[in-house]
Image (spheres, grey):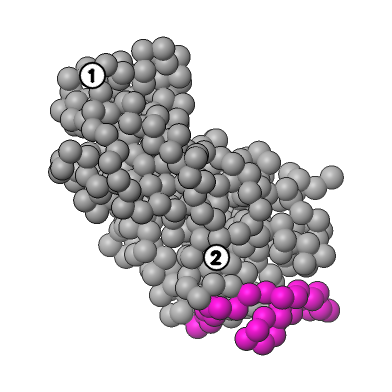
Amino acid sequence: MRAMTQSFLIIGGGIAGISAAARLSHLGPVTLLEAEATLAHHASSRSAALFEPRYGLPPVVALSLASADYLSTANGGVLSPRGLMVIARPEQRALFDEDIAHFGLTELPLAEARAMVPILNRETVAFAAHSDQAWDIDTDRLIQNFAREARGNGAQILTAAPVTAITRTADGWTVTTPKGDHSAQNLVNAAGPWADVVAQMAGLPPIGVTPLRRSMARLPAPGGHELTHWPMIIAAGEAWYAKPDAGALIVSPSEEDPAEPHDAWPDDIVLAEGLARYEAMVSEPVTRLLASWAGLRTFAPDRVLVIGPDPADPQFHWTAGQGGYGFQTAPAASALLADLAAGRPPALDAATVAALSPTRFRP
C-alpha cells in the first residue's frame, strides 16, 4: 500500500532518471521522458563502469558506500571483481602518495605489479599500488533492473520524446513533447548536461552545472595478452586510465574540457595526447584503435551531486551533477530522492543530505 500517492514526470532516461523512476514508482504514477530513441544514450552508455567507493568528495563517497549493498545483492547483483592499480613515474612520488591515501591502496613491489600487468614499462614506472576493493559494474543490467522495477509498478517510459516546453500549473507541471503533453504533480530534473536548461524552461534559476567532455579509445589487447584479470590502471594524478573490457583495453586521457550540452565526440588531438601519456608507461605501442568515443560528465560547481526539491518550488526535484559517479551512486541517490519526495527520514545522515541539497546554491 502506498501511504501517499503522488505523480511524477521525469526528464532524462540515463541512470539518474531510470533509477529515480524505479524508486518513485512506489509512491505513485511515473512518466519518464527521454529525448533519444534509446535509454542511457549519452553519458550512461559511455561510462568506465567501475565501482570504486572511495572515488570523489566525502558526500559522493557516502552515496557510493550506501549503494554498495544494492549493487552487490539486488536482483543477483551487478558487480564482478576488477581491482585498482595506480602507477607513477619517478618524479611523481607526491602525487602517488596522495592517490594511495585517497583510494586506500597498498604499495606493491614493481615485480608484483608487473606480474599483474605485464606491460608496465620498466624504465618509466617507478611506483605501483593496488587494492582489490574495486569492481566492474554491469551497467546495462543495472539499467534494465531499474526499468523493470519501474514498469512493474506501472511507470510509463517514453523514448524519442524531447521536451519542447514546460508549464507550471495550479497543481503541478505540464511538459510538452512531440508525443503529446504529459502532466503530473512533481517534475524531476534528471537531464544530465541539460539539467540547467530544464530548470530554466521550468522558470527556475540554473545551478551552474557544467558538462565536461571525457574521451575514450578502445585498443586491441596489448601484445595479445589475456586481460581478464588485469585491474583498472590509473596513472598518478589521473593523467590517464585504462581498463580491460571484453577482451580489449579502453584508455582515456581523463580530460575534463568544458562543453555545451550535446551528443559528444572525442577531440582527436586530446585523445592522441592522452594515448601518448599511456604509451610512455607501457611496453606495447598503440598500433590501432578499434573505436573511440566521448561522453559529458556533468558536475555541479562543488563537484557534489544535487539531489532533492528546489527551495523555490518544492514540486521541482533535482537529481543532477552525477559527474563520473552516476552508476556507483545511483541506488542511494535515487533512494534519497524518493525519501525526500515522500517526506520520509532519509537513510543517509543529515550532513550528507544537506551537502547534496539544491539549497546550497540558493541565497
Residue 217 rendering spot, x and y as whole percentages: 38, 47
Q: Looking at the image, is mark 2 or mark 1 nearer the viewer?
A: 1
Badge 1, how many Cα within 10 Å: few under 14, some, many 20+? some
The answer to whether residue 59 is above or below residue 42 is above
Mark 1 element type: loop
Q: Which residues are magenta?
A: 154-183
Residue visible at 34% across and 64% down in the picture: 141
Residue 7 rendering spot, x and y as whole percentages: 64, 77
Q: What amino acid type should be assigned to the residue bearing mark 1?
A: Arg
Residue visible at 23% across and 28% down in the picture: 283
The answer to whether residue 82 is above or below residue 290 is above
Q: What amino acid type should be assigned to the residue bearing mark 2?
A: Gly
Residue visible at 18% across and 23% down in the picture: 112
Q: Which numbered disc flags the more N-terminal residue, 2 or 1? A: 2
Give the alpha-carbon distance from disc 2 to disc 1, as whole Å: 45 Å
Decide which of 5, 315 is in the foreground and name it: 315
Q: Would you identify the image quadrant in which residue 303 lies?
A: top right
Query: Residue under circle 2?
Result: 17
Query: Residue under circle 1?
Result: 122
Q: Is residue 238 left or right of residue 358?
A: left
Is 150 within the magenta?
no
